[in-house]
Amino acid sequence: MSNTAEKHSFQAEVGQLLDIVTHSLYTDKEIFVRELVSNAADALEKLRHLQLTEKEIFDDSLALEINITTDDTAGTITIQDFGIGMTRTELVENIGTIAHSGSKAFVEALKTAQERGEDTKAASLSLIGQFGVGFYSVFMVAETTSVYTHSWRSDGEHLLWTSTGKGSYEIVPTEGQRRGCKIVVKLKPEEKEFSQAERVKEILNRYSKFVPFPINLNGERINTVQALWLRSKNEIKDEEYTEFYKFQANAFDEPRLRLHFSADAPLAINALLFVPQENTERFGFGRVDPGVSLYCKKILIEAKPDYLLPEWLRFLKGVVDSADLPLNISRETMQDSALMQKLNKVITGRVLKLFEEEAEKRPDTYAEFYKNFGVYIKEGVATDYANRDKLAKLLRFESSLTEAGKTTSLAEYVTRLKEGTAEIYFLHGPSRAVIESGPYLEAFKARSIEVLYLYDAIDEYVMQHLGSFDGKKLISADSSDAKLEDVSKDSAGEALPEAEATGLCTWIKELLGERATSVKTSTRLVDSPAVALNSDRFLTPAMRKMMKSMRQDVSENPAVALELNAKHPLIKQLSALRSRDDALAKLVTEQLFDNALIAAGLVDDPRTMVNRVYSLLEKVSK
Ligand code: ADP
């Protein structure tokens, strides 16, 4: 232990962060109060937990509360909590480096924005809004910040951490500290408003109403500790819900959906859950951490645990309170307990019901929700076996029968099925236009069969996992599993005689060898001369692409079945060409095959065919 002052440099990233925080023209400077109070509340919460297991706690008689004092003559605001405090090492680790959630996500997102070449100033402003930058936000308003602290450990030191937020900080031993942290903020001259009691009171009312510990401002109690989720629905105003959401999720937006319910059986539950406005995973900010905290009769059991709800529900924010939970039980026991599984089941069921109701009663709201959060529903279909059927009902896709931009559910698709049909068809492609100009759809159009359009890379994977819906098999329209009935179309003209067609197929199969699993004529085609059908049910074109992009080994020759349109002029001419000019017939066949592969999304490097196309051009321009 050292008795002298220690000077430390901030970790480089903290330096950058502070630079952004102090120099950005961030208008909501007042949020530093909220950030410090929220840290104070976290420290108190942690202490409350330690009290359950630790016998020796420094200053154990202190009340679990937050005391804020303002001094407008000195130009200071002081925020003191009797929480867990920090040791010397913790001071260095926690407020000298970036090891914690909010600021880390912020810096990472900022790096991404920088890499994309975005204006970092604009990006940092919007990012601060989304993440908050915790403790460091104090430097928006502080000339110097002093953190007086004593850890809850009885062998801890009395310490003072000070910094002006410019590159370095200092830690010196001091005396007579109470347990917890006392943060004295000496305000910049232009930020003196935050040393006025009225102004601070207004801020606390705005952001810190739901802090579950008493907050005193200059000795006067200003919050009533309330557990909104335990109150009855009809007493609560929308604004209160929104304020609570912002507090609980540390968010700045308005919630998109809300679910407040209580149940008595099979468990006593009070839950208040929210779906946020934005899905930050969509913007590439990394995986969202679970956001629902677990309480027992207003006492926090664990903040945002990862075992309370299925993973695909990690975007939810809020609180689940169950009076049936034991208070001091270890995380491990809790995680595996039958009780937790029951809780998980009941809540997930309610959330699914909420989504179903939205979809039914407010399709537009649901469509907006689905646009942002649909990816979680899909993840659920693929991973949450117990809820798969319910989740499948929530899926939405465009189809050959919907307008562009409008979607259908699988259930609606089924209602439109012709009697006796037991298949649901889908096609994957990057866009509606690409799917509609490909060779696969025409066969289904000619037979008036609806085809779902899948645009996301994971959609096919989801369909594979689902397998069927309402007893109808889900089949990719470009697979050889898609068996279509014959339709004779008058306008299509005469087909190649059967013997000739068979001869042609055998000849092509010989030429292509392993590259095609089979070559035959088909009745599915209307306008295209040939089509490559994927005969590997699991390794679909989209999957191949995904695996290749992850540098996984996939065979260079995908398993495809080639089908020819015996009525197409090109095929008829090719058959005749065979006896006239074998070499040219081979060139044409190779190109025909490659064209079919391109349409199937199976050609990685079209450059290989450039030379062949030149040879063909040479021959036709002779
Ligand atoms: P976050 O709260 O997102 O973790 P902060 O920058 O606000 O980020 O705080 C960094 C860390 O410093 C916290 O995780 C906590 O460990 C520590 N800390 C901050 N304030 C306090 C406090 N009042 N008492 C104890 N520890 C604190």
Image (cartoon, grey):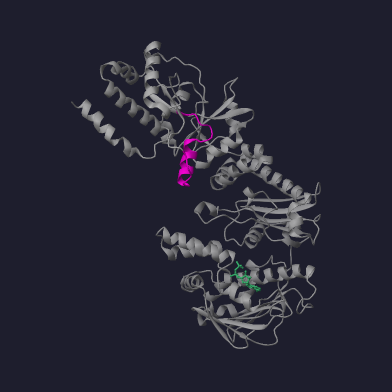
Q: Position of residue 497 (x, y in %)?
A: 38, 11
Residue shown at the point (59%, 46%) measured from the top left: 376
**Does the stretch in magenta take in 168?**
no
Q: Position of residue 247 (x, y in %)?
A: 64, 63
Left or right: residue 352 versus residue 489 is right
Q: Is residue 435 visible?
A: yes
Say which of 184 and 71 sits in front.
184
Q: Quadrant of ligand 1?
A: bottom right
How many numbered marks appear? 0
Q: Is residue 491 visible?
A: no
Vertical comparison of 29 with 550: above or below? below
Say which of 209 and 327 sits in front.
327
Vertical comparison of 542 with 38: above or below? above
Residue shown at the point (57%, 47%) measured from the top left: 373
Q: Which residues are magenta?
A: 533-554
Q: Position of residue 251 (x, y in %)?
A: 59, 61
